[in-house]
Amino acid sequence: MTRKITLRQRLRYAFDNTMAKGTPALVAWLGLATVGLVVAFSLLVVAAKLAPVNDQGVRPGFGRQLFDTLVHAFDSGAFAGDWGNVAFFLAMMGVTIGGIFIVSALIGVISAAFDARLEELRKGRSLVLEEGHTLILGWSEAVFAILSELAIAKESERNPVVVVMADRDKVEMEDAIRAKVSEPGKLRIVCRSGVRTDLGDLEIVSPHQARSIIVLAEDEVEPDSDVIKTVLALTQGPDRQSERYHIVAEIQETANLVAARIVGGDECVLLDKAQTIARLLVQASRQSGISVVYTDLFDFGGDEIYFRGDPALVGKTFHDARLAYEDATVIGLRTAAGSKLNPRGDTVIGPGDHLIALASDDSVLAVAHPAIGTVDPAGIDVSGVLDRHPQKVLILGWNGRSASVVRELDQYLEPGSAVTVVADHPRAADEITHRCDGLRNLTVSFRGGVTTDRATLDGLDVAQYESVIVMCYSDTLDPPRADARTLVTLLHLRDIASRDGRVFSIVSEMLDDRNRRLAQVTKVDDVIVSEKVISLIAAQISENPELADVLGDVLDAEGSEVYLRPAKHYLVPGRDVTFATIIEAAARRGETAIGYRDGDFLHDATRNYGVTLNPAKSQTFSGGDACRVIVLAEG
């Protein structure tokens, strides 16, 4: 049956469609209503000759009346000055009343449109018109450390910008950043809300114009899948740029690296979060103070790693370069074959080779003053032998990174070593069985137990272990509760050490950097803050992609790593020597000295816990029993 549609229905339908177009349509209808009102009343007044005559006895024409009516419609005060007969007075009153309704409606429409626009801005959906910015995709605790580091790194730039996009409320992100990034300096931070795997949302933050892109692993069920999809959207999207991207991406699980490499190719530097944290924890468990050294190396606040070509050193050896500069410490070479830390001292520097050096700033390295510190051969004694023996390690707690810690320990410890794991984690025993098989140098045993329980800890005879690693329960607890449990465990361990008068290394993993100071109260040897370390590395590589190989080499069990070794293995005890002498002593062991740790300030935060990197070659040093030389060495 054919439906009969009336003219009224058609007009109503057309009107509804027009109104659905939003504010412009509403303003247009109000404009038409105003025109209709003014024209209708002007015709009425002119046709009925309602307007009073002027001094010349002439009534205003249609044009003049049209203007007067328009003034009455928009200015209610004009009605007070009217004079004439009652009919004209009533007509102008009608125009004024109609104008009041129309203007009120117009103000309401404009106000609503303005509110809607503010709400749209609050949602963070407007296009970012930036170029050469750093783009952060995703949201986690790492955001704040990255922004703090980039604020320092970009101090010399004219108008530095970082754009952050995550599937969160824009205002909430901005409030959190203001609360946790205390000194952004010149850095301008722009936040946008959007799904980073959505191609349309990605276009909002102009990824093709970004200088570098950091993709964070968010706190969700499958963070790596989301990271891989984001990298895929960037590199394989239909609107991708012709030039190579510079992407730094976090990967939580080592098993997902292969898929991530396939997607990112040579445009993406992948940070294996579990492996990196595991390596730091293992190295810290073997030598106290290593976390302070790595923080100095990775952040932008102190001495940093730079590259420098020096034609004056071409044809000379790497050992010559070690002693070439007063205020910069050469630690390696970058050649056509790649970067190499602590190469052989007789390696010849060729044309086009670049020095890898520690310096307080690139401007310092640019001028590179010649060294004035001299070597004192009489102060060198490298006859000491490093102590190597099987060790017993205790791991308290368990999370998804703990299996990587056990595998890393297997690469560093001597054959015959043993690791005992104590945890109340539901998957710990199963993961030890399936993820810690094929170990060469150590055996692993597991026992269930609450690591915050004093009776459990007393029953372990903790003093028999040379090092204790406290893992946070990040898989089962939120960061505040996980860190709280870790702190309780640390307090018990320190009390046990004081009671028994025994010395053993205590290394702790933390999730929130704000809890580091609380942990220091327990006099823990090292605190590795997972998110902060990864954030520092991500910020460094985002600013200089060439650092990826260097930082990877420092953390890898293969090649040269950082060691804090007793000064007595390098120097004659009780004799003051220059840092140039320390460099020469380390070179005789096939190592590269990068600094020292003063034993008098091991627990003094104001003195950086005694750690000094890249001292001047002429600076003097007296090696006591608790003093350490910081070197790059193989094994």
Image: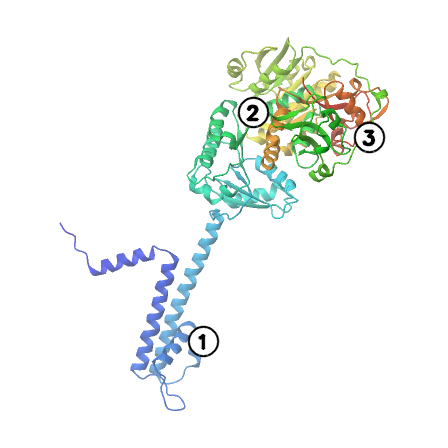
**Whole-percent x, y for residue 531 in the image:** 59, 31
Mark 3 element type: loop
Name the image quarter holding residue 74.
bottom left
Q: Which residue is mark 2?
A: 274
Vertically, is 91 above or below 119?
Answer: below
Few, some or many residues within 10 Å of mark 1 (<14, 14–19, 20+)? few
Q: Nearer the viewer, residue 329 or 296?
A: 329
Name the image quarter holding residue 49.
bottom left
**Whole-percent x, y for residue 320 in the image:** 75, 26
Amino acid type shown at disc 1:
Gly
Q: Nearer the viewer, residue 170 or 610?
A: 610
Name the image quarter holding residue 383.
top right
Residues at marks 2 and 3, CA–CA distance in whole angstroms? 42 Å
Vertically, is 506 above or below 109?
Answer: above
How many marks overall? Answer: 3
Mark 2 element type: helix
**Whole-percent x, y for residue 367 in the image:** 74, 39
| Residue 217 visible in the current orientation | no
Marks 1, 2: nearer the viewer: 2
Q: Which residue is mark 1?
A: 77
The tag on residue 207 is none
Mark positioned earlier in the residue sequence (2 or 3): 2
Q: Farthest residue to the left: give it.
A: 1
Q: Which residue is mark 3?
A: 373
Few, some or many residues within 10 Å of mark 2 (<14, 14–19, 20+)? many
Mark 1 element type: helix
Residue at the spot x=37%, y=60% of the render? 26
Amino acid type shown at disc 3:
Gly
Vertically, is 94 above or below 330?
Answer: below
Left or right: 207 in relation to 588: left
